[in-house]
Amino acid sequence: MNDGDVSRQIQQMVRFIRQEAEEKANEISVSAEENQEFNIEKLQIVEAERRKIRQEYERKGKQVEIRKKIEYSMQLNASRIKVLQAQDDLVNSIKESARKELVRLSNDKRGYENLLKALVVESLVRLRETAVLLRCREVDRKVVESVLEEAKRDYADKIKVATPKVTIDNVYLPPPPTKADSHQPYCSGGVVLASEDGKIVLENTLDARLDVAFRQKLPQIRRCLVGQGGPSSWYGHGCEADKDSST
């Protein structure tokens, strides 16, 4: 084998080694690219799962916050309802106490006579009719009859008109309240007057006047209950300003 043959064989071996090295390098490069793509895809999947977990956590966290707000709102409303109910119960008990005072008022014979006369005069002034129908409780009929003429004269003198014709109705207002029939209609006293044609009716009973007075004073009563903590404060400084301003 001459030098040329040896040289050619060496060159062939070099080319083979180089080709094999290049093929290995290509395999390594391809494998690296595949691994890199796999890692990127893996990272993307992991990040996507993390996002899902975060979103689910945030969603559940918001649901918990919403439930907390709903529960708090429900508890707050329930507390407010309890407070309002307690206030209403107390207001109703105050009104009931006032009604009992009306019963005692009608039991004061002399004082009740003067009150009935004043109610009749006031009703005539407000109606200003020449003829009216008067309705009272059956137990009050004799008292009304005893003060009616004087009441008519007082009205005529006050308004400078002729004395009106007043007819006492044979249909009576409900009787006084008693414990036995507390759920039945009752009237604590007073009168109801109507024009002769019945188109104008003026209710001037003690119960009606109490209802009107109570509606007018209800805001003041509630302020005392809310602002001062209870009825005992009405006799303290809390309601003095309101009491003074009403006189």
Image: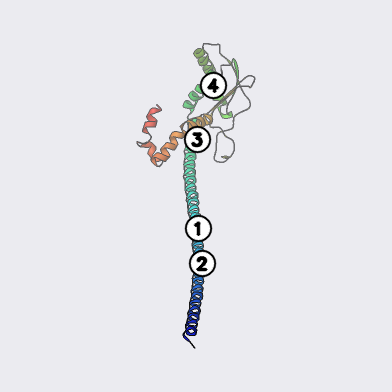
- The mark found on residue 123 in the picture is 4
Q: Which residue is mark 1?
A: 55
The answer to whether one can see residue 107 in this image is no
Q: Which residue is mark 2?
A: 37
How far apart are the two marked residues, 1 and 4, measured between alpha carbons? 76 Å
Sequence order check, earlier mark of 2 and 4: 2
Packing grade of label 4 (10 A; few <14, some 14-19, many >=20) is many
Residue at the location (46% across, 38% down)?
Answer: 94
| Element class at badge 4 | helix
Q: Which residue is mark 3?
A: 99
Horizontal side of 111 relative to 239 (left or right) equals right
How far apart are the two marked residues, 3 and 1, measured between alpha carbons? 65 Å
The answer to whether one can see residue 50 in this image is yes
Horizontal side of 79 relative to 139 (left or right) equals left
Total labels: the figure holds: 4
> Is the residue under label 4 in contact with that under label 1 (CB below 8 Å)?
no
How far apart are the two marked residues, 2 and 4, measured between alpha carbons? 101 Å
The answer to which image quadrant residue 123 occupies is top right
Residue at the location (49% across, 39% down)?
Answer: 92
How far apart are the two marked residues, 3 and 2, measured between alpha carbons? 91 Å
Residue 127, x across and y down, in percent:
56, 19
